[in-house]
Amino acid sequence: MEKVDYNIEFAHVYINEEFSREHREAAWLANRVVQGLEKQGKTYSKVILIDDYNPSENMLNEQDFIAQLARNQAEPEFIAYEASLISLKEKVLEQLNMKRRKKSIRKYIEQHSRLPCSFLIVIWHLLRLGLITNGVEYYRSLNEEIKKPFVGKKLVTILPERLKSVEEKAWEVIDSSLFAGALDNSEFIFF
């Protein structure tokens, strides 16, 4: 599998949001990361994850959102949808080493009839690293002319501080899986 050096996620957006100052700040941070990687001669792909799993109301105009990022010199190469990750649930649950953690996640799913956000993040990070696949692309290229790999050897994740606790739960789950240590060389930027 061909990989770039870094898969950069930024400007996470919910379908019940519009482009905001938070997304502009994420774009600015992504640009700084990209400049640093380019100086080092590293390859990268930029991706946004659209949360279409949790909100019920959809007011996001994707084309406008991407255009706003482009106006901030931060157009992503790839876009992915959180709801599409659900199909990898069992595959990832099988990779958990701790029976107690696996049981806890299954209990949450049973009680709430949905996956916990932290578990969706686990799937997302493993997918970005190419550690899980099943022949389906869970992302799409925004420009078919650009032939860049989606998967990265390492991750850079740029998120608002309000999402840090959910990310930390995801890290704990990954560390209790067959992929423990997968995020060791990754960078997480919270603002």
Image (cartoon, helix red, strand yellow):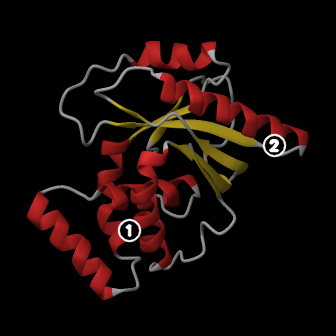
For the C terminus, the image quarter is top right
Residue 129: where, in percent of width, then height? 59, 58
Residue 113, horizontal then vertical, whole percent: 12, 57
> Which is nearer the eye, 26 or 100?
26
Q: Quadrant of residue 15?
A: top left
Q: Nearer the viewer, residue 82 or 33?
A: 33
Residue ID at (30%, 43%): 83
Left or right of 89 on screen, residue 175: right
> Where, quadrant-wise, is the N terminus in this rendering?
bottom right
Q: Which residue is mark 1?
A: 92
- Which numbered disc flags the more N-terminal residue, 2 or 1? 2
Read off the residue under disc 2: 37
Element at label 2: helix
Q: Count neighbours of disc 1 (C-alpha within 10 A) and say few if under 14, some if 14 to 19, many if 20 or more.
A: many
Regarding residue 136, the answer to whether it shows in the image is no
x, y percent for residue 70: 61, 16
CA gap, disc 2 and disc 1: 30 Å
Residue 128: where, in percent of width, then height? Answer: 55, 52
Residue at 66% x, 43% y: name it. Answer: 149
Q: Which mark is residue 178?
A: none
Is residue 19 something that shows in the picture? yes
Q: Residue at x 81, y 43 (%)?
A: 37
- In this view, the residue in front, 111 or 188, is 188
The amino acid sitting under disc 2 is Leu
Residue type at mark 1? Val
